[in-house]
Image (cartoon, helix red, strand yellow):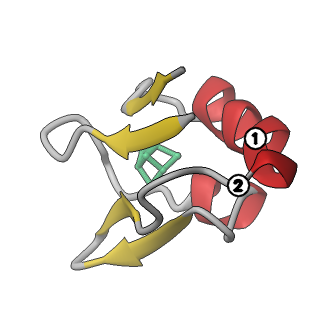
Amino acid sequence: MKAKVDQDMCIGCALCTQICPEVFKMEDDKAVAYVAIVPKEDEDACKEAAGECPVTAIIIEE
Ligand code: F3S
């Protein structure tokens, strides 16, 4: 599974970095996914972060 953050949509609320810091970190007031492949054990948290993002800026690719 892969995840990425749409930089045009992200408003920098940082919720994803709190829910899933193993995948997301803040960079210049926007979140980025800093792992190429989401580790199996972090997939649930990553999906939760995508679901909780207020502007649905997180794109999950299976
Ligand atoms: Fe941005 Fe959504 Fe995360 S707004 S900081 S991608 S929760």
Q: Nearer the viewer, mark 2 or mark 1?
A: 2
Quarter of the image where one finds residue 46: top right
Position of 49 compared to 53: left or right? right
Residue at figure coordinates x 60%, y 65% from the top left: 17
Q: Give the Cα separation between the discs numbered 2 and 1.
A: 6 Å
Quarter of the image where one finds residue 6: top left
The local secondary structure at tag 2 comes to loop
The circle on residue 43 is: 1
The circle on residue 56 is: none
Question: Where residue 20 sits in the image (x, y, percent)?
Answer: 71, 58
Residue at figure coordinates x 66%, y 24% from the top left: 51
Q: Residues within 10 Å of mark 2 (few under 14, many from 20)?
A: some
Residue under label 2, please give it.
Answer: 39
Q: Is residue 32 above or below residue 56?
A: below
Residue at figure coordinates x 51%, y 52% from the top left: 37
Total of numbered circles in the picture? 2
- Identified by mark 1, the residue type is Glu
Q: Judge by depth and name the residue closer to the eye, 29 or 34.
A: 34
Residue at figure coordinates x 46%, y 40% from the top left: 3
Question: Where residue 11 sits in the image (x, y, percent)?
Answer: 31, 48
Q: Is residue 17 above or below residue 55?
A: below
